Image (cartoon, grey):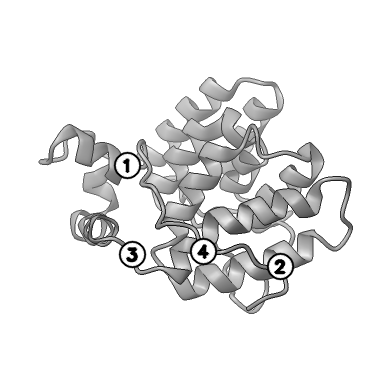
Amino acid sequence: GLTMVRHFLEAGLVDQAQEVAALLLEHGAPPRHTNMCGWSLLAYSLSYQDSSLELTRTLLSHGASVFPLSDAFSPTSAPFRVFLSSLVRAQSLSSARDTLSLLGQVMARSPARMKAHVLSSLVAEARYPNLQTLQVFKEVREALEPHWRRPSSLLHLSLHASRRRLGLKRLNTGALPVAPRLASYLSYRLTLRPPPPSPPSNLQDS
């Protein structure tokens, strides 16, 4: 299955992982496939942060989901939980900022769901804090919170509408009938700036 591509990541072959995943997806591999451990390839990719950014972009543009299957149950294998866990290990956002921006743009399509999932995941993964975990998680929240606290820009809304209208198959043919810069936004190769940040708040705030 698609999750076997993780072996390329484990061997440090991130470019090859992206190429093989793209080939499998183009031939019908389900982007949300999970293995027996409940992990998707997106979760594995997010654990490698920005070093696996191209693979993460490829998976998201083909329909992989950042959210868990059920809003009522967010397992440790949920992609965003895996990403946060990697930040706990790294104790820094320095190698994950581009990935965080991309995740913010993708999850912002569902602001209420995003808020619930981000806040519950932050609390769950901060249960056993290390030296800088709470500071790192504060930065994560401050980066993502504007997506659910402030209205989406017209550009955000138009891009989401365009992705729905064009459909995943047309988006991934590489021959979109749109300007190159717009095509880059639609394929997640470029990310939009979030709305201006809200004032800082504690993890437990609603």
Q: Secondary structure at mark 2?
A: loop
- Nearer the N terminus, badge 4 or badge 3? 3
Q: Under tag 1, what secondary structure?
A: loop
Instruction: Residue 20: give its label.
Output: none
Amino acid on which disc 1 is placed: Ser
Q: Which residue is nearer to you in this view: 64 or 162?
A: 162
- Residue under pointer 1: 187
Q: Which residue is mark 3?
A: 152
Q: Earlier in the sequence, mark 3 or mark 2?
A: 3
Mark 4 touches mark 3? (CB < 8 Å) = no
Q: Is residue 66 visible?
A: no
- Alpha carbon distance from label 4 to label 2: 14 Å
Q: Which label's residue is closer to the chain start, 4 or 2? A: 4
* In the image: residue 103, left or right of residue 194: right
Question: Can you tell which mark lies on residue 198?
Answer: 4
Marks 1 and 3, Cα distance to the nearest angstrom? 19 Å
